[in-house]
Image (spheres, rainbow, N blue to C red):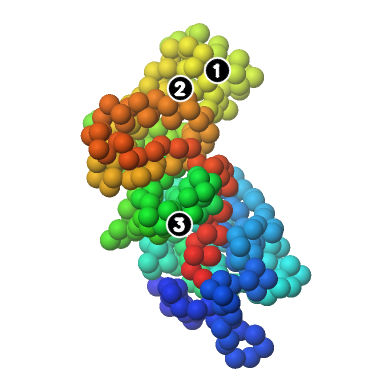
Amino acid sequence: MATSRIPGRSEGTPVMQRQSGPLVTTRTTGKLLATQGYVVGIEMSGNGLRQTVALANLEGKILRKIRRSLDHVPDIKSVLSLIDEMLDDVADPEYLQDGRVLRVGAAVGGLVDARHGLVRRLYHAHEWQNFPLQDYMAERLEAPCIIDNNANAAALAEVEYGALAEEGNGNRKSEQVALYVGLGQGIGGALVVNGRIYHGASSTAGEIGHMLVKEHGLKCSCGGFGHLETIASAQAIVRRMIGLSIEHPESEEAIRRITGSRAERITAEQVFRLAEEGDRVARQVVDEVQTYLGMALANIIHLVNPSIIILGGQVAQVGDLLIAPLRACIHDLCLEEARESVRIVQGKLGAEANIVGAITLALQDL
Ligand SMILES: [Zn+2]
């Protein structure tokens, strides 16, 4: 691994900013002014479908944002050259008139070693083993960079700017144990304890998509079998719905109706709607999601005793159709003392959680 020439993160120290020569401390009344620099956030999806670069001020307000996709499994070169291009645009000197980029945060859809700044693995691309993305971005932007898994970043964003922040409980967020569950194409998860991401010994804490919930289950993206991701991710829900409907003409017809005869485009949200309308196949798929996700959450609740569970990602967009039955499930499966202290809510940032999370990572390091 290459060693960065740029100083790494340092918690609790004043921010130093180069201003025409010597380093000077720019912290004023405990908080940096929004006009004294910028942060850059980078979102990289694990499957190439979504790359985002954003420039934000030090209050977290996004000033510019570009989003692009790649239509294939991303090799390192094509992803980095796309992001380089986007950085050129977003962080053009023309837009940096009030200072320079002070921190870079990157949210990556794969296994990330946050402590060492490495992308350990992207499940859909082989080249990324132990790629030093943190050093690469730090050198590219000449500013310290923080990288983390996208679920960890999204969790932090929901705590700071989304589900928890909107509750107006101010300092209480620093006392919370928040569990974030990102139900997207895969399933990510994260624990935020006292306002900080809990990484565990090797940065894999919160990988709840790979919890074993079903013996002899389907093969997972990681190579294992019967993991939660094979049942409750958006991709799993859609695949199961299409697969099961082959034997059920009425469900096939319902899929055609709801997708305009483009069955392959059906979304997890549409499967939930069909279940609500009474389609038997959709009901079965959704019941399996509720059962196994409920079981996984109940186990986590007993292990870490969270105060809030925030559900994000595409599947969570169905709101109460997912959350109300999950609450009932938790009620049935958990000890009274454990379930009484936990609230289950929908994330507030939706599809923007990862990029806001990347920005939050950068801001939290200042
Ligand atoms: Zn797995």
Label 1: how many residues lie within 10 Å, few (<14), some (14-19) or many (20+)?
many
Q: Amino acid at mark 1?
A: Ile
Rendered image quadrant of residue 299 = top left
Instruction: Check the image and report above or below for 32 versus 59.
Output: below
Instruction: Check the image and report above or below for 94 versus 60.
Output: below
* Residue bearing the label numbered 2: 241
- Rendered location of residue 193, percent (x, y): 36, 55
Which type of secondary structure does the marked residue at label 3 adopt?
A: helix
Mark 2 or 3, nearer chain start: 3
* Residue bearing the label numbered 1: 255
Q: Quadrant of the N terminus?
A: bottom left
The answer to whether 247 appears left or right of 92 in the picture is left
Rendered image quadrant of residue 149 = bottom left
Residue 296 visible in image: no
- Rendered location of residue 72, percent (x, y): 56, 46
Instruction: Check the image and report above or below for 214 versus 248.
Output: below
Determine the residue positioned at 53% across, 65% down. 363
Task: Identify the mark at residue 171; answer none if there is no mark.
Answer: 3
Task: Identify the mark at residue 172; answer none if there is no mark.
Answer: none
Determine the residue positioned at 45% across, 10% down. 248
- Rendered location of residue 232, percent (x, y): 40, 32
